[in-house]
Amino acid sequence: MQATASSTFNACATNPVDARLSEQRVAIRHLAVILDGNRRWAERCGLQSIDGYRAGGRNVHALLSWCSEADIPMVTLWPLSAENLSRDPEELQALLTVIADVFEELACTGRWHLRVIGDLSSLPPDVKRRIRNAECHTATVDGLDVNIAVGYSGRLELLHAIRTLIADHLLAGTVNTLQTDLSFESITSRLYTAGQPDPDLVIRTSGEQRLSNFMLWQCAFSEFYFTPVCWPDFRRTDFEEALTVYRSRHRRFGQ
């Protein structure tokens, strides 16, 4: 009996299908990071908010390097929500300047393919231009795919997808089939992240334990890792700890 049990175990352990499924459960194809805690970090350090934003901006390059070394092919960063656009105008301008600076600095490395997601319509023209130019500059880069969510709202993204679906049917003269054509796939294909895998792991810094309107559709089966470390203090050891915790979990994908 012992030999039979051992043989069965060994067969399962070496089964290529089981191994592939196991690998899919722990591999990170898409990492999302909510870059939170810049202002709290600055306050604790006796600094201005702009100093916290700058410190957080300097940390982005390091994070992307760690992701590249960990063979994570796609990363989404969320530095600015649609709700953040209602902040004090002076503080908001400082934050937007830092975000535009980060876009340009990342583009200059030639290492990463940048893509902005979100509603840029409320951004100052100069900031919008700088972000779009950096995005275009990396269009042909064959490297880590990096989404940067600016003026982003998960609810607005869903609303945009549904409106686009309706507009497509109006244009095609097929409104009569809209009800039957409304599906998971028809909405997913009209999100900002259309064609991309959903995040496997979402990291949020600063101790907050909520999504705050981030990728509501895409994160249905994501794993979450919350750390009390504020974003400017997030180091490689924190990154590796998040990956270790993720890989220790058994993902069920709602099953």
Image (cartoon, grey):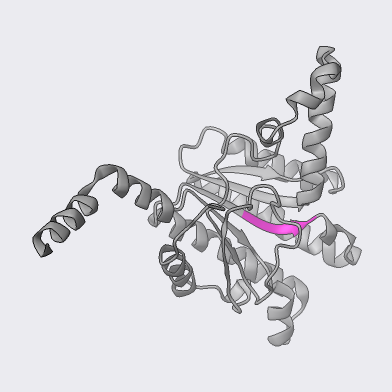
Residue 83 inside the magenta-drawn segment: no
Left or right of 166 in this view: 204: left
Residue lying at the far front in this picture: please name it: 1
Range shown magenta: 77-81
Q: Nearer the viewer, residue 254 or 224?
A: 254
- Work out whether 202 lies above or below 48: above
- Residue 224 location in percent, x, y? 58, 64
- Residue 111 location in percent, x, y? 47, 46
Q: Quadrant of residue 49?
A: bottom right
- Residue 85 location in percent, x, y? 85, 58
- Residue 92 location in percent, x, y? 83, 62
- Work out whether 197 lies above or below 165: below
Question: Considering the image in quadrants, where does the N terminus appear?
Answer: bottom left
* Residue 119 visible within the image: no
* Residue 255 visible within the image: yes
Residue lying at the far left in this picture: please name it: 3
Left or right of 247 in this view: 6: left
Figure label count: 0
Tell me which secondary structure the magenta stretch mostly adopts: strand
- Work out whether 76 lies above or below 56: above
Left or right of 18 in this view: 130: right
Identify the residue at image location x=80%, y=30%: 164
Identify the residue at image location x=57%, y=76%: 233
Identify the residue at image location x=77%, y=36%: 161
Q: Nearer the viewer, residue 118 or 224?
A: 224
Identify the residue at image location x=61%, y=73%: 232
- Work out whether 86 lies above or below 226: above
